[in-house]
Amino acid sequence: MASHYAASDPQTRKAKLEEVEQDDSHRPAFILSRPEVKLLGIAGVAYDLFVINPVATMLQYRLYDGHSLPTNLEGFMKAGANIGSVIGQFTFGYLADAWGRKAVYGKELELIIIATILCLTTPTGSISPDGSLIYLGVFRILLGIGVGGDYPMSASVTSDRANLRKRGTMLAYIFSNQGWGSFMGSIIFMIVLQCYRHVMETKGEVSKVDGVWRIVVGASLIPAFGTLYQRLCLPESTRYQEAQRMADENYFEEEMKKKEKAEAAGVTIRENPASAALFGSGS
């Protein structure tokens, strides 16, 4: 694969596509390379948005003696993250285009971590039951902003780095993590509930369900902290940098001058692979 567009220019070494962006047409699209699996691990954390339903069930027994939650407050608590998600998608999507992926990526995960910790601090034993639901619902809106911001950020970071032939596959894998996150949330919920079963059934300490939902929600912090450093340190993709250069009004004029100088020197000009990747015409 040609990795230089002007062989004699030392700056062209920087034009190489990142390892995950390089062509691997010898393998099927659904088989991922190690860099692609690593990228999916960094970008594909999905859990918090789908765990609210079992949490609501636990709060019924903790706050209302097993009775149903007030309809309006239950709707607010459950819809809070979805409301915030819409805000986060627009906000972080715009900021990622305006400031660059590197400047923004990871900030949405920091917001998710902060909001999750604030949700865990819900003082169910200190304020009224209705107040507890309002408290949790407010911070789930904040959580939703972070989760919503993760959608465009992870999608753009992945598509920027994916080989053109596998871009759709990578995005499908990324968003399939929503289903896996929901599944894992249910598994963790059942495991934790089973651990508390003896205390609640034998000793009648139903209030222990308060610990169940906090552990289930808190478990989402493990993958969040595990990928935070990688997100914050992820470099800007070659494609995004090239797109920014091409947005410069002087880009094509500079490219023509480079070609003229190279032709005068008898050097063969090859297409910048990053530019080719942007338009699907090369490696």
Image (cartoon, helix red, strand yellow):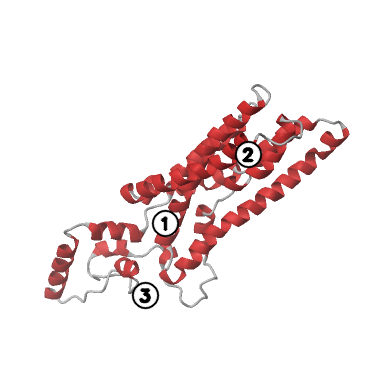
Q: Nearer the viewer, residue 243 or 19?
A: 243
| Camera-nearest label, 1 or 3 | 1
Q: Which residue position holds label 2?
A: 218
Q: Secondary structure at mark 1?
A: helix
Q: Which mark is residue 156?
A: 1
Q: Nearer the viewer, residue 253 or 10?
A: 253
| Camera-nearest label, 2 or 3 | 2
- Of the image marks 2 and 1, the number of the one nearer the N terminus: 1
In the displayed structure image, the side of residue 129 where residue 253 appears, left or right = left
Q: Residues within 10 Å of mark 1 (few under 14, many from 20)?
A: some
Q: Which residue position holds label 3?
A: 1
Q: Is residue 193 visible?
A: yes
Residue type at numbered disc 2: Gly
Q: Nearer the viewer, residue 277 or 129?
A: 129
Q: Position of residue 121 (x, y in %)?
A: 60, 29
Q: Residues within 10 Å of mark 3 (few under 14, many from 20)?
A: few
Q: Position of residue 212 (x, y in %)?
A: 72, 37
